[in-house]
Image: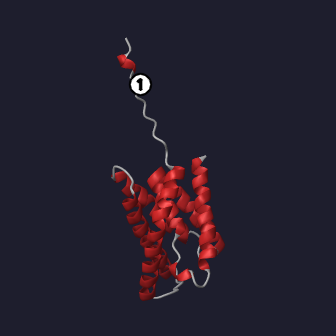
Amino acid sequence: MKTFGLFALILVSLVIESTLLRLPGIAAYAPNLVIIGIVMTSMLRGSSLALLFGLLIGFIQDINFGAFLGETAFAYAVVGYLSGYVRSLLIRESLLLGLLLTGVGTESFLWITFALDHLLGEVVMNAHAMLQLSTQTTLSSMAFMIPLYFIYHRLFMKKRVISYNDDSMQA
């Protein structure tokens, strides 16, 4: 049930990101809420679920807003899998790891979609404008990650059950 709730929250993040955060005064500093959700999925549930959520959310975004089917899905899936892989190399998750993975994930997502746009012939902006956009988006995503980390962690962290009963002590 928590897995479905996590996917629903990422879907709500996509709706908020593509409607409210595209208003004229806010759009320049809008965070990538979907990346935050995918990074938190990778930290709390693992790389395979983050990869699956990235593919599903990316296909939904590509169907509704994308010029090419699969471009955003591929970028989200790569970010989800690599974030989960980095998380699996470390002992435990933390806010600092979440900030780092959000920053690297946002940059990776933006530059992957930029490269795919150039490969597919849809040149939207030059590299200088992309660098400026990616810096703004990364910094705002990292700033939004701080409060959202605690919300995701409280709602979707798997509870570890520790048993202190030792059956070998009974005689």
- Image quarter of the C terminus: top left
For residue 95, above or below residue 27: above
- Image position, residue 137 (x, y; %): 47, 76
For residue 41, above or below residue 74: above
* Residue 14 visible from this viewpoint: yes
The outermost residue toward the left is 90
Residue beneath disc 1: 165
- Image position, residue 112 (x, y; %): 45, 73
* Residue 67 visible from this viewpoint: no
The outermost residue toward the top is 171
The residue shown at (41%, 24%) is 165
For residue 86, above or below residue 102: above
The residue shown at (42%, 71%) is 108
Q: Secondary structure at mark 1?
A: loop
Callout 1: 10 Å neighbours few (<14), some, many (20+)?
few
Q: Quadrant of residue 12?
A: bottom right
The residue shown at (60%, 67%) is 14
For residue 67, above or below residue 152: below
- Image position, residue 113 (x, y; %): 49, 75
- Image position, residue 6 (x, y; %): 57, 54
Closest to the observer: 109 or 143?
143
Closest to the observer: 53 or 63?
53
Q: Amino acid at mark 1?
A: Asn
Closest to the observer: 130 or 161?
161
The residue shown at (40%, 65%) is 99
Instruction: Answer left or right for 147 relative to 63.
Output: left
